Image (cartoon, coloured by chain):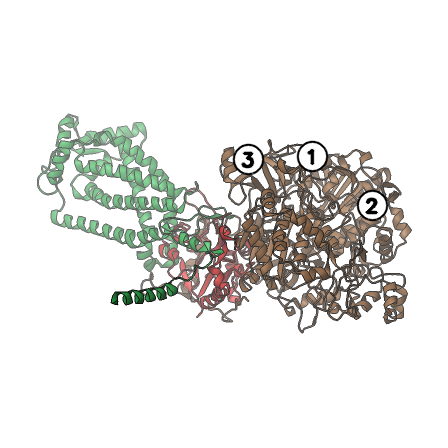
Amino acid sequence: MARMKFYCDAERCIECNACVTACKNEHDIPWGVNRRRVVTIKDGEQGERSLSVACMHCSDAPCAAVCPVDCFYTTGDGIVLHDKDICIGCGYCFYACPFGAPQFPEEAAFSSRGKMDKCTFCAGGPEDDNSSEEYKKYGRNRLSEGKLPLCAEMCSTHALLAGDADVLSDIYRKRVINRGASAFEWGVNFDKAKL
Amino acid sequence: MRKLTKTSSKIDNSVTVDFKQAMPGAISRRTFLRNSGLMAGGAALATTITPVMMKKADAAVSNTGGKIEQVKTVCTHCSVGCGIIAEVQNGVWTGQEPAFDHPFNKGAHCAKGASIREHGHGERRLKYPTKLVDGKWKKISWDEAINEIGDKMLEIREKSGPDSVFWLGSAKHSNEQAYLFRKFAAMWGTNNVDHQARICHSTTVAGVANTWGYGAMTNSYNDIHNSKSILLIGSNPTEAHPVSLQHIFKAKEENNAPVIVIDPRYTRTAAHADHYLRIRPGTDVGIIWGMMWHIFENGWEDKQFIRQRVYGMDEVMAEVKKWNPKEVENVTGVPEDQVYAAAKAMADNRPGTFIWCMGGTQHTIGNNNTRAYCAFQLALGNMGVSGGGANIFRGHDNVQGATDLGVLSNTLPGYYGLAEGSWKHWARVWDLDFDWVKGRFDNGSYEQKGGKDVHVMNSTGIPVSRWIDGVLETPENVAQKDILKAMLFWGHAPNSQTRGVEQKKAMEKLELMVVIDPYPTASAVMPDRTDGIYLLPASTQMETYGSVTASNRSLQWRSKVIDPLFESLPDHVIMYKLAKKLGVADQMFKNIKVNGEEPLVEDVLREINSGMWTIGYTGQSPERLKKHQENWGTFDYTSLKAEGGPADGDYYGLPWPSWGTAEMNHPGTPNLYDTSKTVADGGLTFRARFGVERNGTNLLAEGSYSKGSEIKDGYPEFSHEVLKKLGWWNDLTPEEQKAADGKNWKTDLSGGIQRVAIKHGCAPFGNAKARTVVWTFPDPVPIHREPLYTSRRDLVEKYPTYDDRKSFWRLPTRYQSIQATDYSKDYPIILTSGRLVEYEGGGDESRSNKWLAELQQDMFVEIHPRDANNAGIKDGDDVWVEGAESAKVKVKAMVTRRVGSGVAFMPFHFAGHFQGKDLRSKYPEGADPYVLGEAANTAFTYGYDSVTQMQESKCSLCRITKA
Amino acid sequence: MRIHTLLVVFCLIASVFQVQAAPPPPPPSLYTSDPGIELWNEIRQRNGEVRGVTQVKSTDADILINVSGENWRQYRMQQLIPIAGAAILIVLLTILVFRLLRGNIKLSEGRSGLKILRFTTNQRLAHWSTATLFVILGLTGLTLLLGRKFLIPVFGAEGFSNIAVVAKFLHDYLGPLFVFALTWLFVLFVRDNMPSPKLDLQWLLSGGGLFGKHAHSDRYNAGEKAWFWLAAIGGLAVIVSGLVLDFPIFGQTRATMEFYHFVHSVSAVVLIVVSFGHIYMGTAALEATFEVMQTGYCDANWAKDHHDLWYEKVKDSAQPEEQVQSVAKAGMAQRGSTDTA
């Protein structure tokens, strides 16, 4: 069976935020909730790199571990999903998640956050596939139609990859080979430019 | 190539129980949920206590809501032209699928393209015709609006003449709408018609066309796959053309192509570059000549190419000699080793491509910059080869088309110019009496050329960059009957032009302002007026159909996704209504079918095809374009050529020139000036545009000619005389001979001259040398001149700006009188501007898209830590940025090393605040964008290119203080 | 001669090595190593978070990898839950064992029939509000902590979710009320709970009279004082941390929330576990004890047994039971309060 993963190639990510808006688009996500985001390290300086981050569908998901009501489940493809009907909006999954994937529609007093929302790998939720209930709560279920997450499909430079882990590794390995020697020769040392 | 293959046709989505936590006996969650009655109650209980998760958007329909129709269209944001597949159910735009087949983007998008579905249910649109009455917005009907506007326009025409109405068109028109717009201005009788290209790539078009014949991107985004090196100057495609990075990375990774970025900012593009040269804003000529100094010093230039295909390189070499490393470092700030390394990288790795954008064009010496860039590529022999070229990335989705179709105050469609011959050509195409057309104009002359009076019909109009002076100048100083009294902002925001404070005054002085746009734009809120403003809701390109020209000259067909929203109407329908009111509809649509009030788009394109011989917009018939749309997947990703399939042999989009009539079936020209292909197969030579000889030197190509050319040397452009001389006249059919007699390749409406020339392997426009000396320009050989507002007063004497001009594009234009004053003490920081990936142009459309707006909520200025510390400013503080002409904007400070010390950067997409005041309440109800901010251009200053009147918005001066 | 040969040989050998050993140094490389490599080293740091820049505006969105989350997860799942569960069980068992061994501790001289006012109405109200809130908060808190392990198997996922929703609702809304209740309680009881070092130590050393004879005690014995101060300090900790957790509207980072969760959970579990002792002591452990906080009056003999020094001070105010009841009733009539005798 396929094991679904994301991989963001930092050498290609240009922080165009297509993945962010594609996700908002596909699942009609309200203002304030961002299932996916792009984080840039060393912004404006040499070595600036960006990464697109959302739920990484961990095999040993910390969110699932700490949830007081055990509302998470992992599909056969390794996709970590959760049931909003069970979620109590306590926020623990957000504390535990290394990637900050869980999002909440509210930030209110008395710890009132609303139901947790996060990237579903475009695989919907526990409701019936492609039902309107599923769409309202979790967004589109692309996987059931044989498609892949829209964020990766729309990534401007194909930096963000999503799909079976083996296929992804293959793609990335080819890239590393192509980049080849240049991986060790990166940028120009201007002090030594006079040859 | 990417291989996001779906590994199984049915992905198993079954739930597995997490056995780590469950106790024995617990059943699977899914079955439990399905079977237990608790679900309904629990869910209800849960939702009463905690808020409902998703707000139901108007267009949030499940997949079960009806049959899904897939509509193919093209993104309306930048010039890459990404394909879009819109999913429509019951007329509602419910989904967007990646267009994997599309040769330009292969399904990819940037944030704007990926969120374009929001246009289909955008709530912040201008919904109905609106009029400002006593300071309040009032809804009126279309008929009322057209009537009142028409009456007022006619009144102004009566009193002040047709030149007192400015027709400001749009880079967002479709080709057909752009063409109709230019025609409309001609029917009205004025050359005061312009659009965003003026302030975008006008200096490119002028500089490049005057170098080798056409002023457009010579290769394509896809052709970059073949580049062995890539140089970008004043271009930040990671934010302005994100999907182009797909192609740039391909070259970088597979060809190991070094990427060189020259920019005052360490942009996101620079972060992926191998070389980064930080130049002082406005010193492009210096750095390019500095690189060429090394090229000539080391003999790296392509001598054969220069000998055969370039005129004037020796004059350039003489100028370049002055730019030794020391001078380069003094003027640009870049040390020798960096310049050398960059030059060597380009020289060692050919073919290399050269990319530039606003950073190079928006200067008083913009035309010098662009010509320097061309000279660089000519010196290295990088022109006319796959992987090389001058890959000019245009801005808006159809700025190329609007430029080609002549929405410009200095020409007619197809760059024919404004001479009488051009008007006669177009009068023929329009099937109108030339004298009738001439009679529409004010019968006056306010300029002289060569001692003779120039009729206002043949004189360049006022450009958009100067419209405010057309209002505020004293009437005697404006070379037309009267000053401007009315502005039609037809798809053009005001905050992309400089001098905002004066612009506000000009808006207040006008008698009539009409904004025709899907959004109110800042034009609605900037002026303090109580009436005289009309807002007419235009439909976006998603609500209509037509063709659009991408930066690489390919024409793409857009299909209609949804019906016009609210009471909006497509531009061409509005044009018809207004034309009817103004009494020119019969002439304007003489040979164009009108269904109800909608001109038939296909007929418009056919009329374009029948007249645009200069740049080969003749072969792209509606049928051929639609065929291309239906067969995206048959075009090769790198060469753009269809191998097999219904469009076999064509290049995608029939990139112009697609010579001759559609029947000739010319495949389009993917890379300009490429002699390795036959002209019939998309090859080309340099255009013979500047004469045959100069000062005893042959201006035609020597020993260089297209594959399959029967003339194995240079030749002039084709006319009936040339054909007759060559003995090819009888290759024309009798009908063609009738049409072609007395004509040339530009004016022969049968296309026969072009056909026969190509039949003999020749380019219809001749085979000449490119020239690096433009003897008709203020600076024949490009030189450096300091910006009007410069911080390097020590260089002003050696590199002064131009003398003031009394009348230039009908207006007095200042240079020297501004540079003479030293502003650098009071305004010590160089101010520059640019783009953000989330927003587009003036920004009202993208700031009204909630998915985009959320990502950029505050207007800001990038300021270096040193300058911030000197001014006591911390990251996130509110600051005043005061421009050198005393206009100030209040923005947030972003302290970053992206800019160098002494330079500050502001994005130009924001509007809706003005000098610290929030104007949100002035927008019509429900049509204010989600995000408002100061317009950067409020603080930008006077300064205009010496050939095209391009504004100098890349280098001004400012001071930044804590608010 | 031999030395000479050796020298020659040596030189020859050395010269060979010379030739082999020293090729000219390679020209300095024009290119540098990928700065991105250092980047990944930074991001993988486990002792610090790398903050970048992002266009998404929410708390901590600019942190690429949340390092503290894993520590917190380990703490909560591998330490807090098992230890809390075990502690609760152990303490309950201990009390049970104690009960079995020691039985109900009777009054040494039986009831006297005379009542002494020990707690004012104000004090009783403060105590009971605090106690009620404490129990609800404790139970709801434990539900959220341990419910997944023990209650889901019983009620199922959906059922437990409903319970948890109610538990969270009560916990989050009543929590702030606990602030007022505990403060009120603290103010009313603090004066007499100040430590009397010698006396308290004495009491402690004699085991508080739990095994064997009674120890001397003033109004409150060392045990009660200990509970008071534990409740005060632990309560303060649970309140402050609780408020931080209950109002995540001030941009608290995850690291902040995790820290305060740690404080909240530790202090709460300690309080709960010790409260078992207090509750046992105040209800079933001793004869005639519960009625004291219930009515406010204690039997004189009870006072003599357990708080002898206090008894000496107040014995003159002892009243017969019937009088107290009628006074109480009269008081009720006067004030219209809900005092129950």
Comes first in the chain, label 2 or label 3: 2
Image quarter for residue B958? top right
**Which residue carries the number 3 mark?**
B879
In the rendered view, tell whether residue A138 sits above or below residue B139.
Answer: below
Q: Nearer the viewer, mark 3 or mark 1?
A: 1
Q: Mark 3 and mark 1, same subunit?
A: yes
Which is more toward the observer, B598 or B470? B470
Q: Is residue B234 left or right of residue B539?
A: left
Query: Does residue B291 appear in this view?
Result: yes
Q: Colour of chain B?
A: brown
Q: Could you give the CA–CA distance between mark 3 and mark 1, rounded to whole angstroms?
A: 27 Å
Which is more toward the observer, C298 or B420? B420
Q: Could you give the CA–CA distance between mark 1 and mark 2, rounded to whole angstroms?
A: 27 Å
Q: Colour of chain A?
A: red
**Which residue carries the number 2 mark?**
B459
Quadrant where the N terminus of chain B lies? bottom right
**Which residue carries the number 1 mark?**
B818
Of the residues shown, which amino acid type is indicated by label 1? Ile
Query: Where residue A77 sits in the image (x, y, percent)?
Result: 44, 66
Of the residues shown, which amino acid type is indicated by label 2? Ser
Callout 2: 10 Å neighbours few (<14), some, many (20+)? Answer: many
Image quarter for residue B2? bottom right
Instruction: Tell which subunit mark 2 falls on.
Output: B
Chain identifier, green in the render: C
Q: How many marks?
A: 3
